[in-house]
Image (cartoon, rainbow, N blue to C red):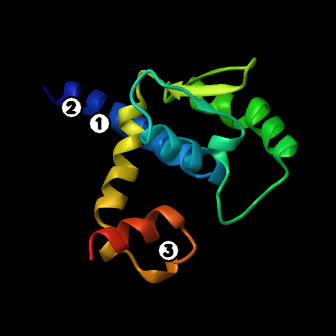
Amino acid sequence: MVQQRFANGRQIIERWDSVFEAVSAEPRRQLIVSLLDRRPGESVPLPEGAVNPNVPCDPEVLRLELIHNHLPKLNEMEFVEWERDPLVASRGRRFDEVAVVFEALHSSASAIPDSLVIGCQRLEEERQTNL
């Protein structure tokens, strides 16, 4: 029994580490939120689906960052699946494990400090909706 709990504990730690690594970069966070707005099986066009609307960027630079960094990382974690031509992403097998973080944040937007909300379009909208 102790051995099983230890093995399960290590697996849970690894899964949480993957979730927090996935959300540690803005393009990945934006992509996950974009996928939350789609039904399972629907894809998101890229790089548009990974852009923070408050901080415009060079789409070609973001496209390269997605292809060479963010998408392979999210795919390896099984949070996202993607295709290169056309460049699109969809929910991966383990998408729910990372989506729950954003669902919890969005549902608690009124309790989040202003320093983490003001400038984040989605959280600002959630806060206004829940007032």
Q: Earlier in the sequence, mark 1 or mark 3?
A: 1
Q: What residue type is labelled 3?
A: Leu
Residue at the image point whose x is 49% and y is 74% from the top: 116
Residue 116: image tag: 3
Along the horizontal axis of the image, is 4 left or right of 102? left
Q: Is residue 2 above or below residue 47?
A: above
In this rendered view, identify the residue nearer to me: 45 or 78. Answer: 45
Q: What residue type is labelled 2?
A: Arg
Q: Do the residues labelled 2 and 1 touch (CB within 8 Å)?
A: yes
Instruction: Identify the residue under disc 1.
Output: 9
Q: In this view, does 94 lie above or below 57?
A: above
Count of numbered tags: 3
Q: Residues within 10 Å of mark 3 (few under 14, many from 20)?
A: few
Percent across and percent down for residue 66 are: 73, 36
Q: Earlier in the sequence, mark 2 or mark 3?
A: 2
Q: Do the residues labelled 1 and 3 touch (CB within 8 Å)?
A: no
Percent across and percent down for residue 83 are: 67, 18
Q: Which structural element holds mark 2?
A: helix
Percent across and percent down for residue 59 are: 82, 45
Q: Which structural element holds mark 3?
A: helix
Residue at the image point whose x is 73% and y is 21% from the top: 86
Instruction: Identify the residue under disc 2.
Output: 5
Say which quarter of the image contains residue 130: bottom left
